[in-house]
Image (cartoon, rainbow, N blue to C red):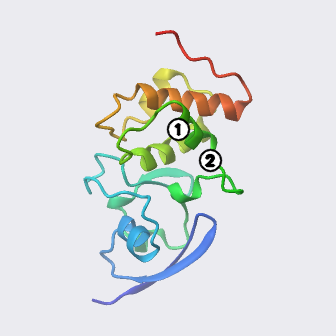
Amino acid sequence: MAKTHVTMKVNGAEVEGLVEPRTLLVHFIRETLALTGTHIGCETTHCGACTIDLDGMSVKSCTVFAVQVQGAEITTIEGMANPDGTLSALQEGFRQMHGLQCGFCTPGMIVRAHRLLQENPNPSEEEIRFGIAGNLCRCTGYQNIVKAIQYAAAKINGTEFKEAAE
């Protein structure tokens, strides 16, 4: 099968590769670029484990062909840390608020939450739950994920995080 040359910016770096037209973006990211933080879950867009940020939108990379993102700008979980290598507010929130258990959904959840906070810097609990509805977690029950996103929003906005009384 003929291969197509693709170029794109991933986590701020120009990358390129030769791909078959049928190569899914998630496989290009994991296998060609060796960025294995983007997980493969269902391969049908149902679970969100493969969520990336593509040109300012949350996208499930398991149903996008690599050739479709020619010239695009992509951010994966590997691009979420601060420039100095320290944890981003969201990564810190997931750590501090115990927003993960097995960790399989975590990369996609953090990337989706990043875009959510770009679109709505101070979301309510209901807006967070709606905003992450396309990303499934089979372990946590979502409560601590919501807290992690609230923690990150407060930190980004320079306000005090106040955990709700239970």
Which residue type carries mark 2? Leu
Determine whether the residue tagged by mark 2 lies in a helix, strand or loop. Answer: loop
**Residues marked 2 and 1 touching at CB (< 8 Å):** yes
Residue 95 - label: 1
Q: Quadrant of residue 44?
A: bottom left
Apparent side of residue 138 relative to residue 122 in the rendered image (left or right): left
Determine whether the residue tagged by mark 1 lies in a helix, strand or loop. Answer: helix
Residue 23: x, y in percent? 33, 74
Q: Which residue is mark 2?
A: 87
Which residue type carries mark 1? Arg
Q: Is residue 154 above or below residue 83?
A: above
Name the residue: 74% across, 29% down.
158
Q: Is residue 141 above or below residue 84?
A: above
Residue 31: x, y in percent? 38, 73
Apparent side of residue 101 relative to residue 13 in the rendered image (left or right): left
Q: Quadrant of residue 138?
A: top left
